[in-house]
Image: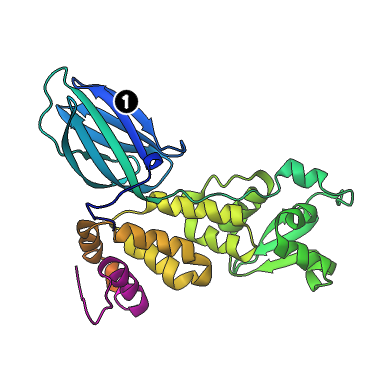
Amino acid sequence: MATSDDYLPEADDFTKVELLSSEESKCLSSSNGNVQWEVAYKSHKLHLSLLSGATSAEVRYFVYVDGGKKESGLAVIQKGQSFDLKMVTPRHYMTTFVELCILRLNPVFKIPQESTLSAALSSTLEADEGLNDVMLYFGPGKELVQASKFMLMARSPVFKKMFETGMKEAESNEVTIDDITLAVGREMITYLYTDEAPNIDSMVEELWFAAEKYELPGLKARCENEIAKQLKIDTAAHFLLFAGRDCGDGGIKMKEHVLSFITQDKDTCSRVMKSEGWKEVKKILHLVNAVSDLYFGVTLNQQQEC
């Protein structure tokens, strides 16, 4: 974490807002306009909130009151949360300037563009005119979902290769997918047709695996965003296991995001390590060392706990 008082940012790193006390609030944006904040007087205290543009941010703040520098400090703020800026209780009608310098951002995962339904339908003159001409059998029970071969090929490089290279599925128009359940299979097919995954919150990990298997980066990014939304003290250890142990190389970005959440400050790190899920993380040495290396700069044999 950047904590040096000697940090000298570029001028355009700063965002500034002027406001008067007495329950006033104002919005301010980063220099490139991608990150939005709110500064507000509420209950006679000065609050800073991260509205959008990142899942969390570390900032250095400066508060000037009536032309004089009053207070400065560091804050790590999660999206949707409010942080009380350290300063004396403001007087009524006192003019205040708040200046922010962003030290670190954990951005929302960028969702790549894939072929939309309309683009897929117009992308080739060789589109199969038949609808629902492929039978997909999901899970151990081999439960059936019918779909369009053209749509599967247009949206997934894996399905495209399957049906173009003389594999048995190309001849039979039947695909058996034992490692994906019917519910997750239906959600994936819904995404292929509509770019939407309405039930992603209840099956995010299984859907991530489906997106990885069939090379759907947009769906995968949506799953990563959903995991970022569900990332809390009591879920952090579980998602670290998922990203670092179960996802392999495909979960590198997710692992980095979860590690950043856990190591954002001493209190968060300590509470995660006391959570029920941490008992399983402790069995995976490289994950424990990743937390220790990032937060303390030392390995497990040098530092055992926060």
Q: Residue at x 60, y 50 (%)?
A: 112
- Residue 168 counted in the magenta span: no
Residue projecting furthest to the top? 93
Q: Is residue 63 above or below residue 55?
A: above
* Label 1 neighbour load within 10 Å: few <14, some 14-19, many 20+: some
Residue projecting furthest to the bottom? 301
Q: Residue 92: tell me if it is visible.
A: yes
> What x and y, as percent, mark residue 113?
64, 48
Q: Amino acid at mark 1?
A: Lys
The residue closer to the viewer here, 300 or 243, is 300
Q: Which residue is mark 1?
A: 26
Q: Residue at x 38, y 51 (%)?
A: 230
> What x and y, as percent, mark residue 70?
15, 35
Q: Residue at x 40, y 52 (%)?
A: 106
Q: Secondary structure at mark 1?
A: strand
- Residue 301 counted in the magenta span: yes
Q: Is residue 267 above or below residue 113?
A: below
Which image quadrant: the C terminus?
A: bottom left
Q: Is residue 59 above or below residue 304?
A: above
> What x and y, as percent, mark residue 181?
57, 62
Stretch in magenta = 281-306
Task: Please indicate whether residue 38 sits to the left or right of residue 135 in the image.
Answer: left
Task: Please indicate whether residue 261 sits to the left or right of residue 153 in the image.
Answer: left
Q: Is residue 302 above or below residue 61?
A: below
The residue closer to the viewer here, 12 or 187, is 12
> What x and y, as percent, mark residue 63?
21, 34
Q: Residue 181: tell me if it is visible.
A: no
Which image quadrant: the N terminus?
A: bottom left
Task: Please indicate whether residue 299 sits to the left or right of residue 142 in the image.
Answer: left
**Coloring applied to the structure:** rainbow
